[in-house]
Image: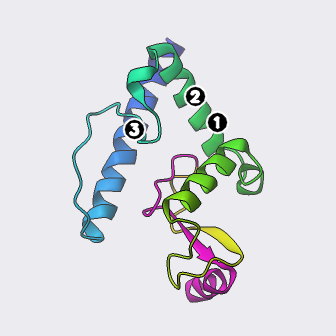
Amino acid sequence: MARKSLGNFILKATKRYFRGKQQQQRKNNVQYNKKKSGYLPPWIDAEKNSPEMNRLYRNYTNYIRNTPYSEYLKSSHWKKTRERCLEQYKYKCSKCGSKDRLEVHHLNYAYKGMEQIGIDIIPLCNKCHKIAHNKRT
């Protein structure tokens, strides 16, 4: 019975995740192709994974989302996500184009562990990162 409720929880969480993404992307006027329910985040190639691996990945993502933020920043998952973000932006600040002292900035903390580059996280130089945090407060 616990397995069935976990499956329902994962399905509902996945639907909520993509519903939030659709709303956020509409706000930013970004074109969006609707995903099927149960669709894994884009950095996972679902065709290469078995259903068992998909289940393990979902459990791992759930674990990541429940870890404290300071611990999450030390995880291998965050290091890989950070590196992908920097690669996608060619190791440049997304605001000023600087290549000095780059940091990855969370625009949204709601999807910790399932961040999408350009929507939830962007690379910023140290100066732009400080400006971004000062605007928030």
**Residue 59 % position (x, y):** 57, 28
Quote the CA–CA distance across marks 3 and 1: 15 Å
For residue 23, above or below residue 67: below
Residue plotted at (58% across, 61% down): 86
Residue plotted at (30% across, 71% down): 28
| Residue at image mark 2 | 59
Q: Which residue type carries mark 2?
A: Asn
Quarter of the C terminus within the rendering: bottom right
Numbered disc 2: secondary structure: helix
| Residue at image mark 1 | 63
Residue plotted at (26% across, 40% down): 35
**Residue 95 % position (x, y):** 50, 82
Q: Residues in magenta?
A: 113-137
Q: Which residue type carries mark 1?
A: Tyr
Numbered disc 3: secondary structure: helix
Considering every residue shown, the one lying at the far top of the view is 1
Quote the CA–CA distance across marks 2 and 3: 12 Å
Whether 126 is among the magenta residues is yes
Q: Which mark is residue 103?
A: none
Which residue is nearer to you in this view: 45 or 113?
45
Q: Which residue type carries mark 3?
A: Thr
